[in-house]
Image: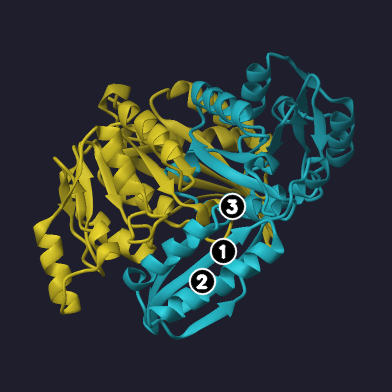
Chain colours: A cyan, B yellow
């Protein structure tokens, strides 16, 4: 039996930062988080990128945390005036920010003197929150309720993510199989693909075309939570493609 | 005089596709659109990524098109059953989709026969919309109202984008200058940065830390629409950094 929608554990990503929206920086955190959550059976259902603006951050956070099981934010937790994520999260939850004595002690040890005012901002955790370990560099992130607040620098974000997975109510992991068709366009593939999709409403069937100097075609991805059903769908899809004259069909990784 | 907020022309990007949310594909379109719009003085103010779900797409589209001057969507305009962007956009605007005779004629010429049912789906444009030229491969995108509907394949998306800029009510282009500090952390930089930011409320000052095998530091970016004001802010920032003992300050591109 294929999984039902009610089995689904969902998450959203909220990327905070003018540098992504200005085009200055290419975001890579969304993809890393999607892949990481997928391994825990948590489906990334939506993502938003907002500017360093209190109203925008709080509105997006409230929309996402009430709709999805989890929210992961990235960015805006440094010591500078444009780092307002912790303040916004605390406001959204209606709690105060408090300095964490352990973080202050770690900063003092690191710098050989008590942290200055800017660095102290990074030692603040919302009341009721818990720290998310930063194994890379600098102060931790934090969790409050269903929201995880992580750094924006990709190497630090990925490090912090390692302290997130074990806190998640995992779902059943999605299995994905890719059927690659070369030399045939989506116009030919669409009809058999849709017919197979209709036969398997609990699986997701997607078509991702490619065009390159070496040729063109599409990767057809079958996703589902029941291994037998996914394999049966793949076999039916290949047969349906062959029935309309499509050749050059291979199963590939990813 | 620095520009006022009312001069701002804004846009949002709506990325449509399960493949981005599943982590299968790394989005690169957001960054390309942000950079492209920036050259026309249009600020990307928000971005969202939603799944191939009619309700989600329409809700996001309506939220964004009513708030910002422009919306650019990517993805979901191919011939397969999971390509529902055109249908959703038409529903959001309360209009029908109609087959475009020119697109059908171009498809017929290309394939040597009339397009099949799947390909005909790509020839549909919402009533009142206009085509966006696809100089790369396949059928066009379209514009309706303040919404531009482009392909998801990056090479095609970038091609279509070339037919978008001349339709925009351009704003005054943002000038960005980057002051790079090496060997000093944000904890030291934060206070002078904030002081300068407070003196220049119409400029945006951001701090983007970096950490690499070669060292650490931060890129401090001053953004504004008035060249003289931006240059004055940069000079004041450098002086303020030097006053607290920061050295290794350079001005860099980007």
Which of the two discs, 3 and 2, labels the residue nearer the N terminus? 3
Q: On the image, numbered disc 1 is attached to which residue?
A: A222
Q: Distance of mark 3 from mark 1, alpha carbons? A: 11 Å
Query: Label 1 is found on which chain of the structure?
Result: A
Q: Quadrant of residue B126?
A: top left
Mark 2 near mark 1, Cβ–Cβ under 8 Å?
yes
Is the C-beta separation of discs 3 and 1 under 8 Å? no
Q: Within 10 Å of the Cα at label 1, are there few (<14), some (14-19), or many (20+) other Cα atoms?
A: many
Q: Residues within 10 Å of mark 2 (few under 14, many from 20)?
A: many
**Subunit ID for the residue under disc 3:** A
- Residue found 46% across the figure and 43% down from its top: B53
Which of the two discs, 3 and 1, labels the residue nearer the N terminus?
3
User: Relative to A76, does residue A195 appear above or below in the rendering?
Assistant: below
Which quadrant of the figure contains the N terminus of chain A? bottom right
What residue is drawn where x is 38% and y is 62%? B154
Left or right placement of residue A25 versus residue A156 in this view = left
Residue B46 pos. (x, y %)? 43, 36
Which element is circle 2 on?
helix
- Residue bearing the label numbered 3: A202
Q: Which residue does the numbered mark 2 point to in the structure image?
A: A237
């Amino acid at each position: 039996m294929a999984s039902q929608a009610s089995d689904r554990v969902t998450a959203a990503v909220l990327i905070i930062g003018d540098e992504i929206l200005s085009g200055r920086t290419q975001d890579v955190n969304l993809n890393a988080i999607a892949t990481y959550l997928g391994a825990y059976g948590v489906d990334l259902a939506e993502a938003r990128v907002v500017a360093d603006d209190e109203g925008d951050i709080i509105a997006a956070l409230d929309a996402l945390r009430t709709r999805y099981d989890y929210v992961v934010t990235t960015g805006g937790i440094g010591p500078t005036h444009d780092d307002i994520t912790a303040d916004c999260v605390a406001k959204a939850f209606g709690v105060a920010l408090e300095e964490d004595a352990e973080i202050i002690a770690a900063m003092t040890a690191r710098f050989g003197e008590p942290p200055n005012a800017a660095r102290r901002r990074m030692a603040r955790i919302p009341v009721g929150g818990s720290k998310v370990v930063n194994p890379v560099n600098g102060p931790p992130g934090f969790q409050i309720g269903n929201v995880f607040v992580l750094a924006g620098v990709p190497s630090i974000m990925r490090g912090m993510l390692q302290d997130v997975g074990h806190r998640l109510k995992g779902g059943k992991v999605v299995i994905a199989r890719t059927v690659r068709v070369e030399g045939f366009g989506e116009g030919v593939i669409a009809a058999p693909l849709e017919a197979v999709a209709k036969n398997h409403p609990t699986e997701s069937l997607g078509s991702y075309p490619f065009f390159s100097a070496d040729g063109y075609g599409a990767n057809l991805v079958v996703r589902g939570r029941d291994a037998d059903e996914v394999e049966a769908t793949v076999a039916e899809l290949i047969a349906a493609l062959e029935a309309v004259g499509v050749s050059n069909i291979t199963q590939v990784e990813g």
